[in-house]
Amino acid sequence: MNPTHHYEQLIMLFDRCFSDEFQTRLIKGDDEPIYLPADAESPWNRVVFAHGFYASALHEISHWCIAGEARRKLVDFGYWYCPDGRDALTQSQFETVEVKPQALEWMFCMAAGFPFNVSCDNLDGDCEPDRIAFQRKVHAQVMSYLTSGIPDRPARFITALAEFYGRPSLTASQFPWPDDL
């Protein structure tokens, strides 16, 4: 990891962008990532990322950026998740719901100058995911966002990252076709 990238920077930037308007905080967790809406324990909605990992924070922020208002009232946004160890059908379903979050994560990484690695997240499954095919789907979604427009919350975070890290605006040429990786 680049020594200039620290999870505390992401917490600060996320809070600047979203804490007041969305009553949401980015939190370093000690275990698996989870989204927790405000409750008796906290007046804040919490995007909890794993173990202080910078990449985990970016990934969890991407899920938060996609979740609509109703889903942001549910633990883990009410999303379906099947852990590592998936069969081929379940892996395909997992990849379908991960395309948009991973596209945003790639854009966040590029805006921060941080390496992106697509995640098929199935190390113990009974099928070998096709990482290149999945990354091509993620790439197509990135191109769609760049062509059609990035939604407000992720666009706001991309701008904050690029300004903080002194990075240029995102362009299609920054996202290589997966064969080039």
Image (cartoon, grey):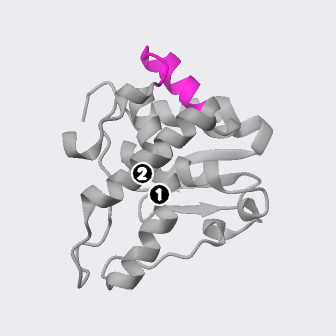
Seen at 63% across and 52% down, the residue is: 66
Seen at 54% across and 42% down, the residue is: 144
| Residue type (three-letter) at the residue carrying disc 2 | Val
Q: How many marks?
A: 2
In this picture, residue 72 sits left or right of residue 34:
right
Seen at 66% across and 31% down, the residue is: 17
In this picture, residue 135 sits left or right of residue 140:
left
| Residue type (three-letter) at the residue carrying disc 1 | Val
Whether residue 86 is visible here, answered yes or no, is no
Q: Are marks 1 and 2 in contact (CB under 8 Å)?
A: yes
Write the start and end of the magenta stretch as one range.
Answer: 157-170
Q: From what the image shows, is residue 156 above or below residue 46?
A: above
Horizontal and vertical percent position of residue 73: 76, 64
57 and 8: which one is in front? 57
Give the Cα distance between marks 1 and 2. Answer: 5 Å
Whether residue 175 is visible here, answered yes or no, is yes
Q: From what the image shows, is residue 8 above or below residue 93?
A: above
Q: From what the image shows, is residue 48 above or below residue 26?
A: below
Seen at 29% across and 72% down, the residue is: 122
> N-terminal of the two: label 1 or label 2?
1
Instruction: Inspect the magenta stretch and tell me whether residue 123 lies in it.
Output: no
Q: Which residue is tagged 2?
A: 138
Q: From what the image shows, is residue 74 above or below residue 135?
A: below
- For the N terminus, the quadrant is top left
- Quadrant of residue 110 in the image? top left
Q: Which residue is tagged 1?
A: 99
Main SS class of the magenta portion in the image: helix
Query: Could you say whether the residue bearing mark 1 is in a helix, strand or loop?
Result: helix
Instruction: Inspect the magenta stretch and tell me whether residue 160 lies in it.
Output: yes
Horizontal and vertical percent position of residue 150: 62, 36
Horizontal and vertical percent position of residue 88: 32, 82
- Quadrant of residue 146 in the image? top right
